[in-house]
Image (cartoon, rainbow, N blue to C red):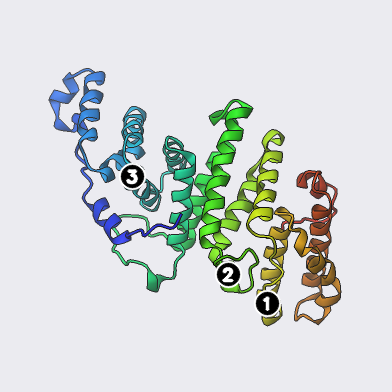
Amino acid sequence: MKLELNFEDLEAQWKKRQLDLFPWLQGLLALLRPRAVNLTITKNKLSSSTPATMVQFLSSFDPETAKIARQIIKAQNSTTILPLLLYSLEKNNKTDYPHRVMNSLLDFNPTISFGYLLAYLHARQTPKSEKNQFSKPENAPDLSEEQIKKSIFQVISEIFFNLNTLFPSSQEKDQFLSQIFEALSMDLKERMPFLSIVLETWGDFEAIKLDLEVILSLFKKTKYEEYAQIIEKKIQQLGQDIIISLNGLPFELEKGEILFEHLIAVIQYMAVMRLEADKQFLQSMPKKIHSFELTEKQKTDIIRTCEAAVKIIDQPETTIRKILAELETPFFIY
C-alpha cells in the first residue's frame, strides 16, 4: 500500500515519549509492593499513555513489561501504531528488538501489517529531496538508509525463521503465506506502471525493486521444505499475474559494472518468478554478451546464470531448490 508517512510527525511523537511510567521508579513504595501490583500499575499507566510510549516499552529489559506493552500495542488502531512500531526500528539497536517488532506485527492482520512494512520500506528509500527532514533524539542510533533497510529485512527474516513455531499447522502456515503474498500483490499492483505488466524503463523497475528484493528474500529464507514449495508457487503466481516480463528493460544503455549488476539481478527475478516470456531473452544472451563491456568472468557468470534460469523456467513442477542443487556453480551471485 502507498502511505503518506510524515517522518517529521513520527519524530515529534517519539520525542514526547513518557519514560517515567515504571512504578518501581517511584522509590521505596514500589519496592514494598508485590511485583504483580507493580505490573498492574504499569499496565494501567501504559494503557493511557501515548502510542510512542507504548512502543518504547516494547523494548523494556523486563520481559513482563515488554509483554504488557505488546498486549497494549495489539489493541491500538493499526493506522496509528504500525508506523511508530516500524519507526522504532530506527531508534533501537537491541539485538532482539526486530524479533519483538515481528511478534507485534503478527498481532495484527498479516495483510495489513506486511502492507505497512512494504510501504515503510519504500518510504525510507525515497530520494532525500522528497522526504521529510527531521532531527534525531540525543543518543539515538544514526542509521543510514541501508541500515534502516537491513533492520526491516531482519524483521522479515525473523518471521520466516520462526514460521514453524509461529504457525504449527500446515493450514495456519498456508493462510499466513497467502496473506503475505496478498500484501505483496497489492503493493506491486499499486507501484507498477499504469495498466502495464511489462516493465520498459529502469524507472519502472526501480518502482518495484524493493518488492522484488523482498520476494527474493522470502525465497532465500525458506528453510523448511514443507512450505518452501508453497512460497515458490505463490512467487510464480505473482509472475503470471503481475509481472510477465522483464526483458524490455534497456540493458544496452548500461556499461561495465552497472550492466553486470543489472543483468544478474534481473535474471534472478526472471527465474524465481519463472517468467516464460523472458525465456527467449535468456537464450539469446550467450550471443549478445560478447559485445558488452564486461570482464571474461562477468560474461561467464551471466551465461551460466541465464542457462540456469532457463532450466528453472522449463521445469515449473520441479522445485527451484532441487534444480539449483544440481548446478555446479552458484545461481545467486549477489
Badge number at residue 81: 3
Q: In the image as oriented, which residue stretches furthest toward the top?
A: 34
| Residue type marked 2 | Asp
N-term mark: 1 or 3 = 3
Is 14 drawn above or below residue 256 in the view shown? above
Q: Quadrant of the C terminus?
A: bottom right
Is any part of residue 72 visible from this angle? Answer: yes
Residue on which the image places disc 1: 250
- Distance between the alpha carbons at the discs numbered 1 and 3: 41 Å
Decide: few, some or many residues near mark 2? Use Cα within 10 Å; few <14, some 14-19, many ≥20.
some
- Distance between the alpha carbons at the discs numbered 2 and 3: 31 Å
> Residue 103: x and y, percent?
45, 36
| Residue type marked 1 | Pro
Instruction: Name the front one of labels 2 and 3.
Output: 2
Q: Do residues under tags 1 and 3 come within 8 Å of each other at their CB atoms? A: no
* Residue 252 shown left or right of residue 180 in the figure: right
Is 186 drawn above or below residue 131 in the view shown? above
* Residue 172 shown left or right of residue 315 in the figure: left
Decide: few, some or many residues near mark 1? Use Cα within 10 Å; few <14, some 14-19, many ≥20.
few
> Residue 22: x and y, percent?
22, 33
Is any part of residue 138 visible from this angle? Answer: no
> Residue 286: x and y, percent?
85, 71
Residue on which the image places disc 2: 204
User: Is label 1 in a helix, a strand or a loop?
Assistant: loop
Identified at 28% across, 46% down, the residue is 52
Quadrant assignment, res 296: bottom right
- Distance between the alpha carbons at the discs numbered 1 and 2: 11 Å
